[in-house]
Amino acid sequence: MPAEHEMDINSNASESIHGALSDMYSREKEWSEFEKTRSGVKGLVDAGIINIPKFFILPSEEQLMLKSSSSDANSIQLQVPVIDLEGSRGDRRNEVVAEIRKATETWGIFQMVNHGIPVDVMNGLLESECQFHDQPKEVKMEFYSRDPNKVFQYYSTHSRESETALWRDTIICNIEAWTASPESLPPVCRKALRSYVEHAMKLRDLLSELLSEALELDHDHLDRIECMESSKMVCHYYPACPEPDLTIGTPKHSDPYFLTILLQNCIVGLQVLNDDHWVDVPPVPGALIAIVGDLLQLISNDKFKSPEHRVLATRYGPRLSTACLFSPRSENKYRSYGPIVELLFDNNPPIYKETSQGEYLRCYISNELLGSRVLTRFKR
Ligand code: OGA
Ligand code: NI
């Protein structure tokens, strides 16, 4: 190659590196200015933006991937199972257990109806979350924090490494901690949060029995190993997005705990990966969603699947969701969990090493960018 061309290429390369750096710098700066407003993504939408700021825009390869994958599932008509829990404490027990076994082995996610949480308790929670986000900026700002030691956090999310922000505002409640200090919850959602959690814990108890039986164990097995005694509540608020194809609400992930009970409002957006197809998890009136977490897959020795899922940004909104993520109590954070001995046979040896909730989360957080499943790192 003639020397002058080589020079050209070098100077182009240095220009583009320079361009990328200054782009990164300006995204970082715009993000930190946005974060200083402490008014969330909703604040931008309320201000009437028509184009989304650059720091929300996904790299073009990712936009293309979203576009090509978001429509394929509907054409092949895969449907997330909907399970009626009516009679699961009585005459329909075996039937319900069989349906849950099938759903957790193939999908790792299912919708539940007649689950025992009254509709007004679910609606009350979603309404109170809306009320929180609808408060004047000055009131909300007080709660803006990403400090995991707080009982209540409210924040927007930005990945420092990929320099892309997510189209959502988040509230996190640490349920274990709030019992000790209920006054740390914002008054607008205090009552609704407590009432929902009380019911969610009862549903967790029922699911713990049904999942134990679906694994062909004693009904109280999961209860005895104390793997879902505590819960963190993660509530996302996805504002209507003027340019939904350019960004994402929640990127692909699996849940790094034991079990998730998810409540969503009537706006579509949640999708689950099944057989390499992204399938919508459509809002079903009155339903709740159960999702197997990575650690339940681990202790079930791959009998249950922990599914990857994501939330698209949409033109309609706001979309609200509340996930109760069940895990061991904080004093058991480093208690070891491995494949359940009763499930192991000569022809079914343990696939995973023992680990703890704390160790797993640490690995999950540090792995965030690698894109591969964290669970595979715990294989023997
Ligand atoms: C989560 C999650 C889904 C949703 O918080 O882990 O997957 O619908 N949420 O927001
Ligand atoms: Ni999730």
Image: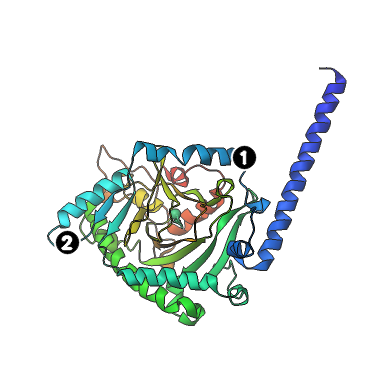
**Where does residue 118 sit, x and y in percent of width and height?**
29, 70
Badge 2 or badge 1: first in the primary sequence: 1
Above or below residue 29? Residue 14 is above
Mark 2 vs mark 1: give the one in front: 1
Q: Residue furthest left?
A: 91
**Mark 2 — residue?**
87
- At 48% from the left and 69% from the top, the residue drawn is 130
The answer, for residue 20, to whether it is visible in the render is yes
Q: Amino acid at mark 1?
A: Ser
Which structural element holds mark 2?
loop
Q: Residues within 10 Å of mark 2 (few under 14, many from 20)?
A: some
Q: Is residue 305 left or right of residue 308?
A: left
Judged from the image, the quadrant occupied by ligand 1 is bottom left
Q: Amino acid at mark 2?
A: Gly
What is the CA distance from the residue labelled 2 to the residue labelled 1?
49 Å
Q: Are marks 2 and 1 in contact (CB under 8 Å)?
A: no
Where residue 107 appears, as percent x and y from the top left, is 33, 45
**What residue is at 44 percent from the left and 67 percent from the top?**
330
The reply to whether residue 150 is in sight is: no
